[in-house]
Image (cartoon, rainbow, N blue to C red):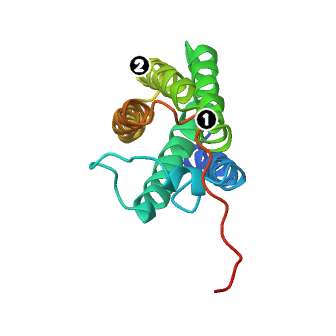
Amino acid sequence: MTEIATPGQLRMSYWRWAMVTVPAIVLIGSLMGRLSNSGFNNRWFASLDLPAIMPPGWLFGVAWTLLYICLGLALAMVLHARGSKGRGFALLLFFIQLVANFAWSPLFFGAHQVTSALYLIIFILMVSVATAFAFAPIRKAAAWLMLPYIGWLCFATLLNFQIDQRNPDAETLVPKAASTQIG
């Protein structure tokens, strides 16, 4: 017998990785958004002058869930590819962009740092493109799974840029407190 593992065993090993990576990325991404009070329920965000291309709030939750699933599957593929040349560097790039991604919501929604968040999302986009190129020789499917994420990052970068342009004082903007007066 010359095979170390059967194709079925290899597939099962990939799915074991995916059973960890997908829920972990979705959970951490969702948690970062929730902890930073991201979205239209954030009074500071709701008080900004938002661009006309801003999608409805529900779309962000759907999009990010699907994108995080794609990222988790791509990560599982590359983790599963033990011994592949360039795997360590590809994983390093992936984790750099992922940590930066998780930092964006607290920076934008929590700290109200719109301009800094713009620089961060540009960095995330650049590292994500590099990650896709690093994934391609290891697992082409993993690189393809990065493309929807990269596309969304391009759109999110445009949104962040337009919000920054339309709200030059966003960092100092403090929304009015909710009124508790009955009258």
Q: Which residue is drawn at 50% across and 59% down?
A: 61
Q: Which of marks 2 and 1 is nearer the N terminus?
A: 2
Q: Is residue 3 visible?
A: no
Front residue of this view, candidates 118 and 151: 118
Front residue of this view, candidates 140 and 41: 41
Mark 2 is on which residue type?
A: Phe
- Quadrant of the image occupied by residue 59: bottom left
Front residue of this view, candidates 130 and 35: 35
Q: Residue at x 34, y 38 (%)?
A: 155
Q: Can residue 116 be seen in this view?
A: yes
**Badge 2 density bin: few <14, some 14–19, many ≥20, Cα 10 Å:** some
Mark 1 is on which residue type?
A: Thr
**Badge 1 density bin: few <14, some 14–19, many ≥20, Cα 10 Å:** few
Q: Mark 1 points at which residue?
A: 172
Say if mark 2 contacts mark 1, CB within 8 Å: no
- Quadrant of the image occupied by residue 1: top right
Q: Mark 2 points at which residue?
A: 133
